[in-house]
Amino acid sequence: MNLDQYAIAEEPFYAPVAEEVVLFEAAYAERIPLMLKGPTGCGKTRFVEHMAWRLKRPLITVACHEDMTASDLVGRYLLDADGTVWRDGPLTEAVRHGAICYLDEIVEARQDTTVVIHPLTDERRVLPLDKRNELVAAHPDFFLVISYNPGYQSAVKDLKESTKQRFAAIDFTYAHADRETAIVAQEAGIALDIAEKLVRIASASRNLGGRGLDEGASTRTLIRAGKLIARGIGIAQACDMTIVSALTDDRDTRGALRSVVSACL
Amino acid sequence: MVPASLRLSAPDEGAHSGDVLARRLAGRPELAARFAAARLLVARHVEVADADMWAGSVAALYDANAGPALLEALWSLETRLLPGTSVPALLALWSATRTLCRHAGAAVARRAVEAVAARVHYGEDGAHLAAVLRILAGLAERAADAVAPLLDAFDDIVDAVDASGLEAWIADGLALHPADRRRRAAYFRLADAAARQRLAERAGAIRYAPHEERLRKVTRALFGFEPEVRVIADRGLRRTRLAGGLLLMPARFTDLPAAEAPTTFEAAVLHAACHRAFTTTRFAVGRMKPVQLALVALLEDARVERLATRRYPGLARLWGGLHHAPASRIQTIPSLFARLARGLADPAFADGDGWIAKARRLFDDAFAADPAQQSFVPEIARVIGHDLGQLRIPFDAKGYVVQPLYRDDGLGLFDWAETDPENADALELMVEAARIREEEVDAGSSDAPAEPGERARAQPRAEDEEGTLIALHPEWHHRLRAEQPDHVTVRLYPAAEGATDPLRARLAVARGVRARIDALVRRARLDRPTRLRRRMQGDDLDLEAAQEAMQALRLREMPDPRIHMAKHRQGRDVALMLLLDISQSTADPVAGEGETVLSTAALSVALLGEALAGLGDPFAADAFASNGRADVRITPLKNFDERWEAALPRLAGLQPAYSTRLGAALRHGAARLASRAHHRRVLVVVTDGEPSDIDVEESEYLIEDAKHAVARARGQGLDVFCVALGEAADKAGAAMFGRRNTFGVTRVSELPQRLAALYYQLTVR
C-alpha cells in the first residue's frame, strides 16, 4: 500500500500562536495521542497539515459524522468477481503503514464508534479487526490526532471519559489580533489595513458568542471575506456575505452585526 | 335608548328626521335656529339620505339630555370638519358623544368634544378624532368618573399616544385600579408615576423598545458590555441622560423624524457606551457656571467619541451624519455650540467663526498630546467659556438643549456633591439632575412596586388567610398498612408576586449556563435519527447485511433477505411537572453566594422553564409546603398552558415557610400530570431533605407515605424523579424514590446547570 497520495508536498501556511509546534513534536516523539481543542475555524486542521508536512508523515484525515460506523474507520469486506475482499478503512491504513490519522470533530461520531480507537491509544498500540480476526500492530510512525470543539459540549454529545483520558490536549484559540491580521492578509492576499479591519469586526463579533451567536466570526471566515475583497467585492458586502448572513438568521443580531461592520470600516 | 315608536314625537312614515327635530325644537327658538344653520351646512356637503341620518343622530343626542352647549360644541366642531370628513366619521362623532353624555353627563361630554375640537385642523378628516371620542365613550361606559380627570391631562396624553395607544393605556388604568376611584382619578390625570410610565410604554411610532435588542448586541460587540437603558416618560427630559450606570431615554423625542430613529437610537446608545468606557471620573462642579458646564459636557462628548472612532472609524460616520448645524455667522449660544460640536466631530467642517476655531485648535492640541487625559476638558471649557463672556453672548441655562439630538444632556457627567454652595445657577441644574433620578427610582420598572397599593400586593399574604380547598388526598399509614381516605387537605395559595428585577438580573448573569442549556435544547429538539438495520425494506442498503447475504449465496446457504436499513426519527412527546419544596429549611443560605436554597431553586426553575419553552415540552410547576394535614399548601408557579415568563414574578415572590409533607404534594402533582395525554410524563420533585410536618412525630410515617405516593404515581405511568439538595439529601431521597431516580446535588449553587442537564439526561435518550 502506498501512502504517497496522503503525503503533503508543499508547506501549508501556518503561523504558530504559542508553543503548539514544540508540544506537538514532543507528543509525536512519545507517540502520545493528541486532542486539539478550540473553536471552529481557528486553524486546528491547518495545524495538523502543517505538522504532517514538518514531520514528513502522510496525513489521513477522517471527517467524523453521525452516521459513521466502526467499519467506516477500520474497513470491511467487499465483493468482487472472485469473492469477498477485505478493504482497509482509513484508520487501518494509517495504523499499518505509519501515517498520522486525524479524526476531525470526533464528537460528531457516535460514542460506540469511537471506542475502536481505545486499544490504539494506550500502550498496546494495536487495532483489532474482529471481522478479519486480525490484530494489527501499529506501525512505529503511526500517530493519532483528534479535534474537538468544546463549544458544542453537551450532555448528549461529549467524549466518553475513557476516551478523553487517553489523549493529551492542546488548546487553540484565535490568534492575537496582530498575528491574526497577518494571517488574514497573507492567506487572503489583501492589504494589512483591510485585514486589520476584518479582524476588528471578528473580535467584536466574538463578544456576542453565547449571546446571540454560538461563536463569533472565525479566522477562516475572515480569510473567506478577504478573498472576496481581493476579487473586488466591497468590504461591507463581503462581510455581509461571509459574516453577517452566514452567522445568524436572527433579525436583531443581523442588525447588530451590520452596525458592527459599519462601525469598523 | 327609547324605541322610536314610543317617542312622543314619533316620526311619521316617510317624514325626515330633520323636520321632526325642527318641529320639536320649535319651542326653543335659539336652538332651533342653530340647528337649522347646521342642517343647512350639512346638507351642502352630504347626500340627502345621509343628512337625514345625521339629523337622526342629533335627535338621539338631544334625547340623551344634551344641553344646548354640548350641541353647540359639536356643531362648531362640524363646521371645521365638514369640508374633509366622511359621513361615517361624522355619525361616529355623534354617537360617541351620545354615549359620553349618557354615562358621564353633558358637561363632561362637552369638555371632551371641546378638547377634541381644539386639536382639529380645518378640513381634516375626522376619523381619528371620532376614534378618540369613541375610546372616551368606552371609558365612560366602564368608569364614568375617570373621564373628567383624563380630560384634565388630555393634551399631554394625546400628544404621546395614538388612538390604539390611548385605548391600551386606558385599559391599563382600569386594570390597575378597578375599584379605587381616587387612585384611578390620579392615574387618568397623569398624577401617578405608573400612569406616566405606562403612557411612555404605549407611546406610538418612535419608541426605543424595537431597537433595544439590536443595540444591546451592538454595544456588547463593540464595547464588551451591555447598555442599561430605561425609558422615562417625563416631558422635562428632552435628551438622554446618564444616571450612574443607567441611560435614561426620553419616551418621546419631539424633534426626531421616524426615518432617523434607528440611527439616532444607535448613536445615542453607543455615545453613552463611550462615556461609560472613557469618562473615567465625573467632573467636579465647583464654581463652574452653567455655560462652562455645558461646554465641559460638549467637549467631553467630543473627546469620548474621538477615542471610540480611533478603534471604530465607522462610528464617526454614524455620529457625523446626525450633525446638521450649517456653517454660519450667527453668534448665539445654540448655534455656536451646535457648530462647535460639529466641528469637533468632523475635521472637514469649515466654519469661519473665530471662537469656534480657537476652541477646535485648543481641543485638537490637547487631544493630540494625551487623549486619555480627561482634565484638559474643564481647562479648555474655562478658557472658551470666559471668551464667550467677553463676547457678551448670553447663555440661557434653562432653555439650552444639547445638539445634536442623540447626545446626552451632560448632567450625568458631573459630580454634584462638590458643587460650591454659592454657585446658585449650577445648583438649579443639580436639582434638575436629581429630580428625574428620584422619580426614575420611584417609577422604576413596571414590575417594581410604585404605589402603596401595589406594594401591598407584592407582600406575602396574611398568615391566617386560608387558601381555597382544592383536593382531599388519602395518606398511607405504614403501621396500619392501609390508606386513610381523605386524610389530607390540599389548599391553593396563589403566588404572591414579587419584583422580578433581581431574578431577571440573576438570569442575565447566568448567561453562561443559559448558553449551555441552549445548546442542549437545540440538540434535544433535533431528535437524532436512529438507524434501523436489517430491514426487509428501507432507504439504504445495509452494507454489512448485504455482504453477509452475498457470502451466504456463495456458500450456497439460504441468505437472510433483510438487507436494508432505514432511518427513523422519533418525535418528542414529553410533559414535565415540577414540584418545588419551599418549606422553612429552604431559607438556609447557600455557601458563599449570598443566596438561599430557595432563591437558587427559583433561578433553576426559571432557567429550566426558559429552556423548555425553547424545546416546546409542556411544563408546569407548583411550589409546596405544609402546615399540618389540614393545610397542605400548593402555590402554582406555572400552568401547562402559560408562558414561562408568567412564572417569573411568582418565583420571585416565593417565601420559605412551614414544613414538607412530601407524599401529599406528590399525589397532588401526580393527579395534575396524570390527566395529560403524553408519551412520557415526568414528575420531578426538588427538595432539600426528609419530609416532616408539625403534626407528625414519627419520621418513618411520612417517608413511608411518600414511598407509597411514588409507587402510586409510577402505577399511573409517570416517571418520578427526585432532585435532592444538600449534603446528605440524596440518601433521604433514595429511600423514597429509589437510588436510580434520585439525583443528589451536593453543592446547591450548581443546581441551575444540573437541573436542566438532568432533564435532558432523563428525556433525550
Image (spheres, coloured by chain):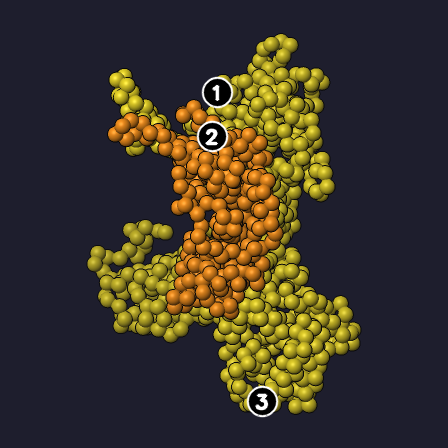
Chain colours: A orange, B yellow
B641 or B68: nearer the eye? B641
In front: label 3 or label 1: 3
B336 or A155: nearer the eye? A155
Whether label 2 touches label 1, CB < 8 Å: no
In the image, residue B385 sits, relative to residue B43, either above or below, namely below
- Number of residues whose C-alpha sits closer than 10 Å to that of mark 2, classed few (under 14), some (14–19) or many (20 or more): some
**Numbered mark located on residue B609 in the image:** none
Residue reaching furthest to the left: B14
In front: label 2 or label 1: 2
Whole-Å distance between the Cαs marked 3 and 1?
A: 87 Å
- The residue depicted at 49 percent of the width and 64 percent of the height is A185
Choose the circle earlier in sequence order: 3 or 1. 3
Residue B555 at x, y percent in the picture:
28, 19
The residue identified by callout 2 is A136
The residue identified by callout 1 is B716
Residue reaching furthest to the right: B421
- Residue type of the residue flagged with mark 3: Asp
**Numbered mark located on residue B353 in the image:** 3
Residue A226 at x, y percent in the picture:
44, 63
- Residue type of the residue flagged with mark 2: Val
Q: Which quarter of the picture shows residue B308?
A: bottom right
